[in-house]
Image: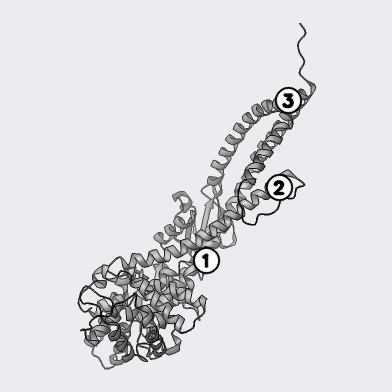
Amino acid sequence: MKRRTPPRFVVRTLLATVLTVAFVLSAALLAVTYSGGGLVRSGVTDRLERSQRLLAALEERRGEELRIQAATLAENSTLKAALDTYQTELRTASPEGRRELVETVARELDKLASRIHPDVLAVRDDGGTVLATAGRRSIDWAPHDGLPDGQSAGFVTSAAGVFRLASVPVALQDQPIGMLELATALDDRYAQELTDLSGERALIVSGDRVVASTLPAPAMMALTPTVVRALSGIDTITLAESEYAMRRLVRQGDAQVFVLESIDAAARPIMKGALRTLIAIAIGAFLLACVASLWLARTISRPVDRMSSSLLAMTQSRDFDNPVAPSGSSLEVDTLTTAFNTMMASVRAAEAETLSAYLGTIRALAVALDARDPYTAGHSERVSAISVAIGRRLQLEDSELEVLRLGALLHDIGKIGISDHILMKPTRLTVEEYEAIKEHPALGARILRNIPYLAPHIPIVELHHERPDGKGYPRGLQGTDIPLLARIVHVADAFDAMTSARAYRPALGTAHGLRELWRCAGSEFDAEVVHALAQCVPTLSGLYADGPAPQTASLARLEVVRS
């Protein structure tokens, strides 16, 4: 019996498919083998450059935050008073008196350090002499060359290591009376933080010595002084028979910070995995090519037509907002057009969800703060409603009203960082407790700076306790130097604090609250804003019910401060 010969088309299709697959896979295998190292090197370099840009931006931001924090600490009134007393009485004081003056400055510095737990916090007199130090690395704080002229933040090097330093003047009535130094050590803990953030190795050097690193021990042993001095001019380096890509994050003076990634370590798993995958793909591709060639020879276009029709019918059954019209000239193009319409609809939905999530986050933050004390429940919502009513009375734009509404909701978010025993204390606050609670505007501003969407609301959160007479906090701004929206929230906050019940007293009447606001208008509160509140009080009847007002004005003012 004569053996049946396969159809010519089947043979040709099978041979063409198998040979094509074999050629492509062989070429791919050779390309991976010979150029895989270069691709890995390029990938490692690109990844390291991205990490370098991100970390460099982070380092710049850290320096700026350190400077801002130092400037805030330099405004501490008790520290200024101690320094002023030291400068005034230094020349006439006895040796014992001088020691007492310095001890007074040191105590105030220790109080500041206990709040922020710095590596180094130091204060110098106007002659540059270090009077006192505090912090985790204060014992290592030694004389240094200082920052370059005109800079208030940067790196300094001493025998004990490298530090990021922010140095700001301490001034009393615009007269410098000393310098405050806030420093972060660039030590092993700092190097580990960089590694945790980027996934890369970190190296910190000063001159020809290694200050800190997360490199393996063999690589560290290869970092001789000669090698360290040559780091600035190279992008790759071989340490302990392992090649590293290297990028510098920052340099100032002799101090340099680098990130490194091992090219060999990155290449090994990638190459091994790529070869394993290619082999598996090759076997599967040959088998699939044989089956597909036989199937394709018998059914050329019918399955393709059926699949295309099914896909088209499925996509046409979906409802889109203003979809792109299909061309009608090519089924494939029309299918891609439909997929594009689907993607655009998903993008629009995602944008709407993102905005809703932002608004929900703001309300959740306000509710979380109010939930700490059942007597302040709804305080943030009421302050927001009162502020918007005042803003409408002042004929603010809709965009300003929206910023005012959300900023008022978040005005007390910094109190999340204030202890419960201070916030819910039923009696008068001590001086220390009052100073602690005054930190909440600045703390709230620092929280919101991490969320770009909330940037327009930061002035409200940070400045809603400023007063027209300049006796507010944290900056002591006066009059119109205080943003209008912050002045509005200040009045609304005070009004709600006086007219809401607390655990230690019933609510004051709205009339009593207005009288107190009018009495302090022009000094503690903006008179124009108080006038606007008085005009819109009848519209706030749903928020408050007038009641007796047995409390004294002083107790009302105390409540304003605690709000």
Q: From the top left corner, tell me how far across and down residue 119 is, in percent.
A: 36, 68
Q: Are marks 3 and 1 in contact (CB under 8 Å)?
A: no
The reply to whether residue 464 is in sight is no
The reply to whether residue 7 is in sight is yes
- For numbered disc 1, what is the local secondary structure? helix
Quadrant location, the N terminus = top right
**As shown in the figure, which amino acid type bears the numbered disc 2?**
Asp
For marks 2 and 3, give the CA distance: 28 Å
For discs 3 and 1, the disc positioned in front in the rendered view: 3
**As shown in the figure, which amino acid type bears the numbered disc 1?**
Ala
- For numbered disc 3, what is the local secondary structure? helix
> Looking at the image, is mark 3 or mark 1 earlier in the sequence?
1
Q: Which residue is mark 3?
A: 298
**As shown in the figure, which amino acid type bears the numbered disc 3?**
Arg
For marks 1 and 2, give the CA distance: 44 Å
Q: Is residue 271 above or below residue 126?
A: above
- For numbered disc 2, what is the local secondary structure? helix
For marks 3 and 1, give the CA distance: 61 Å
Q: From the top left corner, tell me how far across and down residue 497 is, in percent.
A: 30, 78
Q: Is residue 301 above or below residue 515?
A: above
Please give the name of the residue rendered at 33% of the width and 87% of the height, measured from the top-left corner.
517
> Looking at the image, is mark 2 or mark 3 earlier in the sequence?
3
